[in-house]
Image: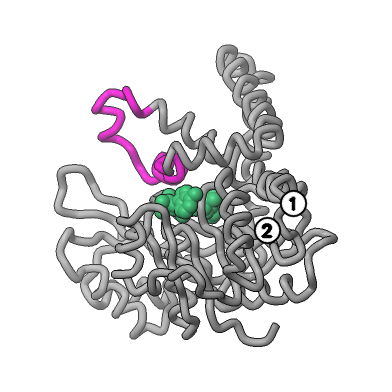
Amino acid sequence: MSGLESVLVVGTGLIGTSIALALREQGVAVHLADRDEGSLRLARELGAGVEWAEGVRVDVAVIAVPPHAVAGRLAALQKEGAARFYTDVASVKALPLREAASLGCDLTSYVAGHPLAGRERSGPAAARADIFLGRPWALCPTEETSPDAVEAMYGLVKLCGGEAVRVGAEEHDRAVAIVSHAPHVTASAVAARLADAPATALGLAGPGVRDVTRIAAGDPRLWTGILSGNALPVAEVLEAVAADLAAAAAALREAADPGAMARVTELLHRGVTGTGRIPGKHGGPARAYATVQVIIGDRPGELARLFQVAKEAGVNIEDVRLEHAPGLPLGAADLSVQPEAVPRLSEALRAHGWHLP
Ligand SMILES: NC(=O)C1=CN([C@@H]2O[C@H](COP(=O)(O)OP(=O)(O)OC[C@H]3O[C@@H](n4cnc5c(N)ncnc54)[C@H](O)[C@@H]3O)[C@@H](O)[C@H]2O)C=CC1
Ligand SMILES: O=C(O)C(=O)Cc1ccc(O)cc1
């Protein structure tokens, strides 16, 4: 299919509205539908598109609702003849395909999809057009899917700035159990320890615990649906994680024994190996950035001034992490840059009066 001109987004939450905004930026006509009037209105007011009027037929319908609701929406949309092609964005893929088949949906025009991009917040207010840039976007056509439908979805993913990855639904589900679903439960288990932690402990919280628990802030209702839709693959990974944790705890009970601590060290080494295997930006190999730490005042415009100095020094800031010192009007910014840019950036920052610890 050449040129995708009109899209219907059903479910104007975080992902649906983000897709709509990304497509609007590319000049695509976007129609919106959601069973929740407030979400629909907000998405419209954010410039994500116009309300879908029944009878309007589009090139592609994107179903961006919770996993268990996908097949029902697909069946209803196909009955109305809403689009030429259909896709969804649910975090699990075998479930909607199975349910769509049992509801008698037309599987030739449906390509199950999943953008591996998102946030720990829900709803249209959290939507951003750029969350898909350089991110993988799984597409799971089956033997029944028409080549035209697959081609249309590659076009849609490209328009959103994502990188299409073709994969079978079962393989997809086993993969995301490892890289997304089990990590979510693990993050929740760590974050749950904070629910009744003493104030002293919370006051000492640093970036490490933030990194490990960020995704645990996600919507529990949505995540219950995701996990129940991928139950066995997730259970398998969690059992392996639990075994590692139980072995580490048992070893720490005998910490005076060097043999026991060696087992803990071995787990830490496997962890280092695992983190090193996570691909870097744009799906390329992991790239180790160097960090330049700068002390910043808690004042408006401080970061903008910092970025300006980096820009003038010709240094690209790949990532930035802010750490606020509790109770102090100061914080630290960790700037991730290419290792070779560290001396240039450090020198430029010092020359402009910044304090580098
Ligand atoms: N949150 C994330 O970071 C990611 C989520 N996903 C998947 O995207 C889908 C949507 O998730 P979010 O946008 O995060 O959720 P969200 O809660 O922000 O939005 C979901 C929207 O769907 C609407 N909705 C629910 N059932 C509906 C139905 N039967 N008909 C019409 N509208 C309905 C809700 O009113 C809501 O506006 C889910 O399947 C999720 O697994 C995929 C990638 C990332
Ligand atoms: O917040 C993050 O880092 C995520 O990875 C979000 C996310 C949540 C659910 C998905 O199915 C895909 C991505």
Q: Earlier in the sequence, mark 2 or mark 1?
A: 2
Could you tell me the amino acid type at mark 1?
Ala
Q: Is residue 171 above or below residue 268?
A: below
Left/right placement of residue 230 relative to residue 6 reads: right
- C-alpha gap between disc 2 and disc 1: 8 Å
In the rendered image, which residue does mark 2 sit on? 112
Residue 169: give its label.
1
Q: Is ligand 1 within 8 Å of the beta carbon of the residue shown at mark 2?
A: no
Task: Specify the amino acid type for callout 2.
Answer: Ala
Magenta portion: prevailing SS class: helix
Name the foreground residue: 250 vs 106. Answer: 106
Question: Comparing marks 2 and 1, which lies closer to the viewer?
Answer: 2
Q: Quadrant of the N terminus?
A: bottom right
Q: What segment is highlighted magenta in the picture?
A: 194-218
Colour mode of the rendering: one colour
Is residue 313 highlighted in magenta? no
| Residue drawn at 57 percent across, 19 percent down | 249
Q: Tell me what residue is drawn at x 33 percent, y 56 percent.
A: 37
